[in-house]
Image (spheres, grey):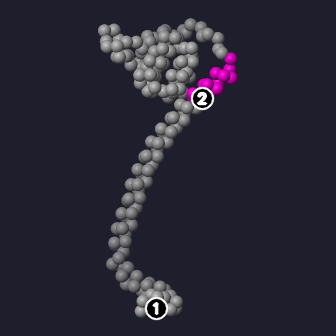
Amino acid sequence: MSGADKTPGEQAIEVLVYAPIGLLWEGASLLPQLIEKGRGQVATARMIGRFAIKQGRGEATKAASKFQDQTAGWLDAVSDRLTPAAPAPVASPRPARAAVTALPNASPGRRRDASSLAIADYDGLSASQVVNRLAGLTKSELEAVRRHESAQRGRKTILSKVAQLQG
């Protein structure tokens, strides 16, 4: 008899009586195969999960950094409009640092690295951290930062703030 020819009672007996008996009879031989398939599925799921987490962290870090830079620029623009202009800074007690300029006897495109900038660890700072340190710099130090940023990362937040302070 095919499944369509069976009455609901016969189908119930097959599912509730014969199937469990067949499972008990064959279960012992099928169990190692089922265990191995289960292990394979778990290993695959773990590998996919680790990959997804790694990718997600990278994307989240990029998005957070971009958001931080954009927010810092926006906050700087808003705060400049809401607060009166600060008086011109008094001469800084720290020694002036050399601006980023072309090296003597070097080709015109070659420049000094960030260690010559007036902002310590410049390349290790986020845009918002750099923007917060620009206000006390001299015109030549601002120009050095502008040249370095234009040549390296080109972060608009920093370049906009430098242009604002220079103007």
Against 34, is 49 above or below? above
Q: Amino acid at mark 2?
A: Trp
For label 1, count other residues whose C-alpha is less than 10 Å away and answer few (under 14), some (14-19) or many (20+).
Answer: few
- Could you tell me which residue is drawn at 64 percent across and 11 percent down? 87
Q: Residue furthest top?
A: 91
Q: Is residue 145 magenta?
A: no
* Highlighted magenta segment, given as a residue range: 72-84
Residue 51 coordinates in the image, percent (x, y): 41, 50
Against 71, is 122 above or below? above
Q: Is residue 77 magenta?
A: yes
Residue receiving disc 1:
5
Q: What is the C-alpha distance between the residues marked 1 and 2?
A: 75 Å
- Could you tell me which residue is drawn at 61 percent across and 10 percent down? 88
**Quadrant of image for the N terminus:** bottom left
Element type at marker 1?
loop
Magenta stretch secondary structure, dominant: helix
User: In the rendered image, is residue 129 in sight?
Assistant: no
Residue 47 coordinates in the image, percent (x, y): 39, 54
Q: Amino acid at mark 1?
A: Asp
User: In the rendered image, is residue 144 in sight?
Assistant: yes
Q: Are marks 1 and 2 in contact (CB under 8 Å)?
A: no
Residue receiving disc 2:
74
Residue 31 coordinates in the image, percent (x, y): 36, 74
- Could you tell me which residue is drawn at 41 percent across and 58 percent down? 45
Residue 109 coordinates in the image, percent (x, y): 35, 16
**Quadrant of image for the C terminus:** top right
Front residue of this view, candidates 82 and 135: 82
Element type at marker 2?
helix
